[in-house]
Image: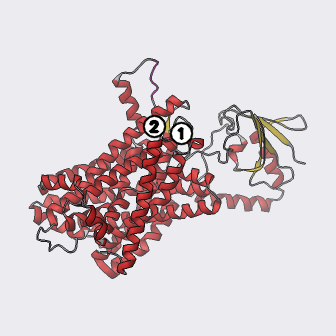
Amino acid sequence: MPPVAAISLPESGLPPSPSISTKLEVSDSMSYTAAENLNQASNSDSSSSTETIYHTFRGKIASFLYMAPPLAASSTAEERLPLRSTTSSQDRNKRTLQVTPQSSSSESSPILTYTTNAPPTRPPTRLLPSLPEAYHSVPVPRARPGEVSWLSRCRTLLAYVGPGYMVAVGYMDPGNWATDIAGGAIYDYALLSVVLLSSLLAVFLQVLTVKLGVATKRDLAQMCAEAYSPRFAVFLWITAEIAIAACDLAEVIGSAIALQLLFGLPLVWGCCLTALDVLIVLSFFDKPGRRFRGLELAVMGLIAVIFVCFAAEIVLSRPSFSGVMKGFFVPDLYALATQAPRLYIAMGILGATVMPHNLYLHSSLVQTRDYGESVEDKTEAIFYSSLDTIIALSLALFVNAAILIVAAAAFFDPSGSTQDAPSVSEAYDLLAPVLGNKAASILFGVALLASGQNSTLTGTLAGQIVMEGFVQVRLKPWLRRLITRLVVIVPAVFTVVLAGDKGVDFLLVLSQVILSFQLSFAVFPLVMFTSDVSVMGTEFVNSPSTSFLAWVSAILIAALNIWLLVMTVGQGSIPA
């Protein structure tokens, strides 16, 4: 019978703080720290030098491929080894959870017994927080009692600025460019209303993810893994990975096109070269906890470059103001519902604007702020994080609208002879002669390159969060990036070789339509969780009106995807 140890938990029902060295009282009346007890058990297993060498070698390989959670010097045993639950009993106001180290099978292995007087809640199935390298790593200034000055509010807002811009990157990635250029060149300003509605829907859904992350201290992937059966959770994980791969495909192609336009590099070599940006990502992840704020600032700097480039493009293109206003606020719903090519591009804009992997990403990034545990602190965190999201996605709306406006002003033929939209490469070549300024093409290429590299950084984070949340596998960021890039480079290079620039442009639009199809698998769980009082609590659960609007949005997205599928099957091919 292995020795049994008991640990008394605080009222919160969570394990003791890592900064406290917890004592284990064992049956023979001896007292050890958790780390000492486990070390003794581990030493007893290593009876031979051969086994020691084998386990050491295997550990080196694992540490090279997988990320270990960051541990303080005084970490307790339950944080040094992954734990698995063996038994769980509940008795009114007292709950006990017995756990054993997962890697230990010896009879002498200690069994740790947690006891808490907290009311029955969700059992602590996961000890590590979302994105543990950066969890609560960004300090938030605490306002003094009675201090409500604008200066203190601005300081607090600046502390929360960052995650919204990390998410906004996904709303202006290279995949948006192909869909927006196609929409503007073929349908003039008519699809600006789709850009506007998609952006408003994106803001609404991202604010829901902010509430989920702050209120539950879990990201969307972790919530799905806990709430659903293992099989369904794996299914959702696969759909999320498909969405990330589709987004990464757009990043690869967009960066390759930008390198070709600016430096004359062939598309095939550009696609292969983009795999090396894993080294750039790796440099940011060297010391993630310390560098996370720097990563946010780098992303915001690249967004500023994109914004300035397209502000200049709009000035150079001289669009019709009345046409822009009509496109924004007078949608042609009948044409959208009856014309498959128009609906196809509209769904591409929706998929490019409302990114499914961003819902997983944002629910984790908001937890990087070191806000308090009280209802007031969480309410403040939700308010400022939502404000950060609204400002950042407003910039993304401007960029998306600017791309479509410039394409409409430069390439749309009022006589109706425009049948095919120019590719991204053709748009670069045509901008200078059409607008009469060579700077227009250069600005276009610089913005495209910044967009592709920006999306690379946030794509790595999203992939890490999704994999850790659903299946609790923590790959090193460079390995994760390399695997994803190898998967998407093959179809990209294959398409470039066989179909050339037009094939690449088609692949860009198709990747965004794939994202649109994957969106429902992230939106429905998000709406379910934020509308559930047992998950969010009475203070943060959606109001009836918010829940109604959320469900309408989710059903509308699913219905549009089904309608597009029906129209595509009816025509026998993908609309072009």
Residue pictured at 78% horizontal, 61% vertical: 51
Residue 558 position by quadrant: bottom left
Residue pictured at 67% horizontal, 58% vertical: 59
The amino acid pointed to by label 1 is Ala
Q: Nearer the viewer, residue 312 or 558?
A: 558
Under circle 1, the secondary element is helix
Majority secondary structure in the magenta region: loop
Above-or-below relation of 383 to 465: above
Q: Nearer the viewer, residue 85 or 28?
A: 85
- Category of crowding for the residue at label 1, using alpha-carbon neighbours closer than 10 angstroms: few (below 14), some (14–19), many (at least 20): many
Circle on res. 215: 1
Residue pictured at 62% horizontal, 56% vertical: 228
In percent of width and height, residue 353 lies at 35, 56
In percent of width and height, residue 334 lies at 27, 64
Residue 98 position by quadrant: top right
253 horizontally vs 95: left or right = left
In percent of width and height, residue 96 lies at 78, 40
Residue beneath disc 2: 382
328 horizontally vs 508: left or right = left
Q: Nearer the viewer, residue 307 or 76?
A: 307
